[in-house]
Image (cartoon, rainbow, N blue to C red):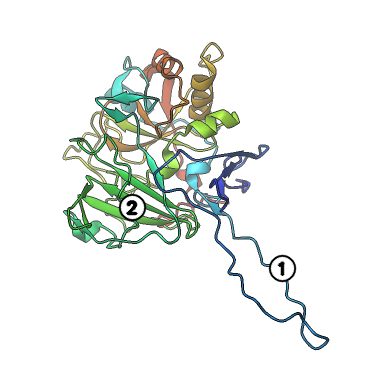
Amino acid sequence: MLAVRTPRTILLAAAATLSLTAGCGTTTKPTTFVPPASPIVATQLAVPSASSPSPGPSTPKPTPSAKPAACSVLPSSNVWNADISHLPVAKQSAAYVKSIGISAPVHADFGSGTWDGAPIGIPITTVTASQKKVAVTFQYKSESDKGPYPLPAGAKIEGGTRSTGDRHVILYDPAHCTDYELYSAYPQSSGSWKAGSGAIYDLRSNKLRTAGWTSADAAGLPILPGLVTYAEVASGHIDHAIRVTVPTSQAAYIWPARHQASSSHNTALPPMGLRLRLKASVNISHLPKQAEIVAAAMKKYGVIVADNGSPWYISGAPDSHWNNDALHALGGLTGTDFEAVNEAGLEASSNSGACAS
């Protein structure tokens, strides 16, 4: 039976702080941190001031204004936040790991500084409640959420404005507790945008996308919940699964994924949504602190196959505080250190990301 955890909570404060605790079935002392810096920073929702007469004998005294409701990065019960360290090993584990790459090293696809002139990782742009929304035209219109999307002029694009890669855009709106995500996003001179696909997530909901639909990711999953941020590492722990890419996937997906991106029916290949974990027996105590915290999360919460790409590339947000040398130490971990898990027992409904209770 899975106990409900306290969620990763995003408070509507001037610094848009996040408070994180442990995943499904665990409890950890909450920590608070600031999300990655972005061009537009969320601010506290202002309480309108109005001049009114002092309450008289017949006028009820006004009650204090309630604090804005906190926004969590998916509900506490969501599978992204589940401790999978005790789940059984999947029958196809050896085949899956072999196909991904037994000797291939783990690579933190995020860090500080730049690579080819752009920040390293998938950036998060935090927007205000009043951010103007604009129209987005999609290549995969039938599987994209229409929008509009709150895209500021300075919205950060993965790989930078000149990127020829995935060009993900992640927009976090804490006031409305909403995550907007785009794939292959290009701003237009008119102020509108074009993108390959797009998805909008209510971060207070466990609802999954329509079965068979893509998102801004091949697996039809949100990207934001699987990103590693420096603030989490600074807090001493990461309490969710991490997004990972594999060289080749099979033409299948398993819960909680909603979409496949392959023409191969080779069952030795990992399906989208596959959960893997770093084996409990792997010694991580020698790793630099930043790397050790990431590795500990991969033991407890694992990684989720979300896209095709390089083997064992884990995703995170760029930050000037990352120590790239420390993150590179994760390369000492290879495919042989991982195993696929069977998380079917966590599934309560095929249309919900909530853990079974």
- Residues 288 and 271: in front is 288
Does residue 137 appear left or right of residue 292 in this picture?
left
Whole-angstrom CA distance, mark 2 to mark 1, is 34 Å
Up-down relation of residue 331 to residue 96 (above or below): above
Front one among 17 and 89:
17
**At 80% across and 85% down in the image, what residue appears?**
56
Q: Quadrant of residue 29?
A: top right
Question: Horizontally, is 298 left or right of 184 in the view?
Answer: right
Instruction: Name the residue at the top extreme.
Output: 286
- Residue name at image x 27 percent, y 51 percent: 214
**For residue 152, which numbered disc appears in the image?**
2
Where residue 110 appears, x then y in whole percent? 37, 28
- Name the amino acid, label 1: Pro
State the image coordinates of residue 64 (x, y, percent, origin top left).
71, 68
Q: Choose between 356 and 309: the one closer to the eye.
A: 309
Mark 1 element type: loop
Q: Can residue 303 be seen in this view?
A: yes
Q: Badge 1 is on which residue?
A: 64
Q: Can residue 300 be seen in this view?
A: no
Q: Residue 193 carries which label?
A: none
Q: In this view, does 212 lie above or below 290?
A: below
For the residue marked with disc 2, what is the amino acid?
Pro
Question: Would you call the spot at circle 1 few (<14 residues within 10 Å), some (14-19), or many (20 or more)?
Answer: few
First in sequence: mark 2 vs mark 1: 1
- Label 2 environment density (alpha carbons within 10 Å; few <14, some 14–19, many ≥20): some
Q: Which residue is drawn at 40% across and 47% down?
A: 256
**Left/right of residue 305 with respect to residue 34 in the rendered view:** left
| In the foreground, 184 or 293 | 184
Tell how many labels: 2
SS for dot 2 = loop
Say which residue appears at 29% left-offset and 41% top-offset: 157
